[in-house]
Image (cartoon, grey):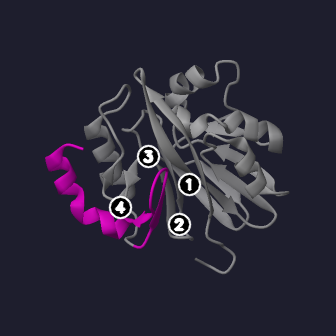
Amino acid sequence: MSAAQASPQLVVTSGTFSIDGEDFAVDNNIWIVGNDEECLVVDAAHEAAPIIEAVGGRRVVAIMCTHGHNDHINAAVDVADAVGAPIALHPDDLMLWDTVHPDRAPDLLIEDGARFDVGATTLVALHTPGHSPGGVSLYDEDGHAVYGGDTLFKGGPGATGRSFSDFPTIIESIRTRLLSLPADTVVYTGHGDTTTIGDEAPDLEAWIARGH
């Protein structure tokens, strides 16, 4: 990364992911991208307070939701209200959003190719459905980084087999939108460890063979 582009700040929060009548305890990664003056929050999960603390006095350009599952959006409204920032979500996940925040719509609907400027960084939205219909990854070309939400993890694709998810779709998203990025691109994930495109690309056919 260039001298003007610092590594993203990581906040980890814990809570419950609920889907199809089941609850799962999860730890979520919240990535704060920007500089000392302004930042952007990727996935405001579970607890508003540690996210607000990490933001500090910076201007928040947006609260970006990589997808609409409750564990990635359940603190979005509280954080947005506290810091005066808009919430952005892909329209294909509005049905998921509405189950968590029925009385508050997102402020911005993310379109494929939309650009978000924060400090010295430009993030480009890549529509990467499969884990959910409105999944997006945020690509920082100059910083050699992508914020992939739950699309691609260290060791494989995000989970499918639940409502609104589809394994062939997530494989196609990974193949065409993510593995086509430069091999040195760091993947900042929604849960767990970071990885790189180069580390994951050789295993695509193995994931297809195993079916998850």
Alpha carbons under labels 1 and 4: distance apart: 15 Å
Q: For numbered disc 1, what is the local secondary structure?
A: strand
Q: Earlier in the sequence, mark 1 or mark 4?
A: 1
Q: For numbered disc 4, what is the local secondary structure?
A: loop
Q: Earlier in the sequence, mark 2 or mark 3?
A: 2
Q: Earlier in the sequence, mark 3 or mark 1?
A: 1
Q: Is residue 71 left or right of residue 194?
A: right
Q: For numbered disc 3, what is the local secondary structure?
A: loop
Name the residue nearer the viewer: 84 or 179: 84
Label 3: which residue? 150
Label 2: which residue? 141
Alpha carbons under labels 4 and 3: distance apart: 18 Å
> Does the magenta-highlighted stretch encompass residue 206?
yes
Amino acid on which the number 1 mark rests in the picture: Val
Name the residue nearer the viewer: 15 or 63: 15
Q: Is residue 62 left or right of residue 146?
A: right
Dot 2, crowdedness within 10 Å: few (<14), some or many (≥20)?
A: some
Residue 47 at what x, y percent from top left?
67, 41
Q: State the extent of the magenta-drawn residues as a range.
A: 184-212
Number of numbered callouts drawn: 4
Dot 4, crowdedness within 10 Å: few (<14), some or many (≥20)?
A: few
Q: Is residue 2 left or right of residue 145?
A: right
Q: For numbered disc 2, what is the local secondary structure?
A: loop
Residue 124, labelled with which disc? 1
Residue 24 at what x, y percent from top left?
44, 35
Rendered position, 195 above or below 23:
below
Q: Earlier in the sequence, mark 4 or mark 3?
A: 3
Q: Is residue 190 left or right of residue 61?
A: left
Q: Quadrant of the C terminus?
A: top left
Amino acid on which the number 4 mark rests in the picture: Ser
